[in-house]
Image (tube, grey):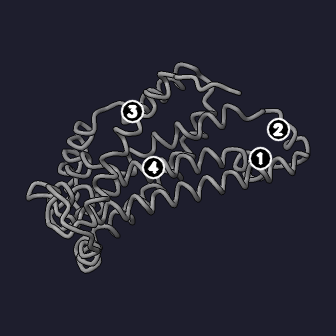
Amino acid sequence: MSKFRFKWSNVYLLIVFLILYAPIAFLIFYSFNSGTTMDHFDGFTLQHYGELLADSRLIAIVLNTLLIALLSALLATTIGTMGALWIDRLSRPFFKNTVLSLNNILIVSPDVIIGASFLIFFTMLHVPLGFSSVLLSHIAFSIPIVVLMVLPRLREMNRSMLDAAADLGANRRQIFSSVILPFITPGIFSGFFMALTYSLDDFAVTFFVTGNGFSTLSVEIYSRARQGISLEINALSALMFIVTLIMIVGYYFVQQSASRRRRREAR
């Protein structure tokens, strides 16, 4: 009979998960509260979910946030992938390392500095603050993330595959579409989802570059929190958490299915 072994690492892991998920569980629990505050639980109700669906302004802000996230992730993935391909082709190590260092500046810089820089930049160019300024800002800080996701896949690629394709008569376009692109597709998808996540979560940069007639979900929640948290926000957070969880589980099953298909093809 195997004996249970006490491990401090398991206790540490349990504490980390409690710290991460206890506030989320607390928030979701009170989204069903019939009261108006999170001081005590008065009873079960779905009233706040009904108020959420009836709040046309908040629904519009959610749609704006999703639209910004999808567009910025798509454009940043396209530009970042082309940038990674260009960086990978650089032959001079000094120039290549310099470009990589410049690419990483937006990742290591504080969000407040980035937001203030974008605000000054758009003001100097007389770009109106709103949808366009938020979209351009999200594209800009998402590009370095995509580059860092795609570059490792390019470095792992066996260059002999490119030589073999060229020996078989493939031109550059065919080599890219048939050899390079399929190999780096996992990195491209990773970069897209990372860019999408960063865009949905961003507050500091968006707070600086958004205008009076446009808002995203993070900025709206901050504005409402200053007036007192409404349980309608709890209901919205609960729905977003459930949707995110479903997407993660779905992505996991897609990865597992693709992995099983690759193993069958290898056999």
For disc 2, the marked residue is 161
Quadrant showing the N terminus: top right
Residue occupying the point 39% across, 33% down: 15
Q: Report the front residue among 110 and 226.
A: 226
- Residue type at numbered disc 1: Val
Residue sitting farthest toward the top: 94
- The answer to whether residue 216 of the structure is visible from this angle is no
Q: CA distance from mark 2 to mark 3?
A: 47 Å
User: Do tag 1 and tag 2 residues touch (Cβ < 8 Å)?
Assistant: yes
Marker count (numbered): 4
For disc 4, the marked residue is 195
- Residue type at numbered disc 2: Met
Q: Residues within 10 Å of mark 3 (few under 14, many from 20)?
A: few
- The answer to whether residue 232 of the structure is visible from this angle is yes
User: Do tag 1 and tag 3 residues touch (Cβ < 8 Å)?
Assistant: no
- Residue type at numbered disc 3: Ile
- Foreground: disc 1 or disc 4: 4
Q: SS of the residue at dot 2?
A: helix
Disc sitting over residue 211 in the figure: none
Q: Residues within 10 Å of mark 4 (few under 14, many from 20)?
A: many
In the rendered image, the vertical position of residue 232 relative to residue 133, given as above or below: below
Closer to the N terminus: mark 1 or mark 4? 1
For disc 3, the marked residue is 15
Closer to the N terminus: mark 2 or mark 3? 3
For disc 1, the marked residue is 179
Residue occupying the point 27% across, 64% down: 31
Q: SS of the residue at dot 1?
A: helix
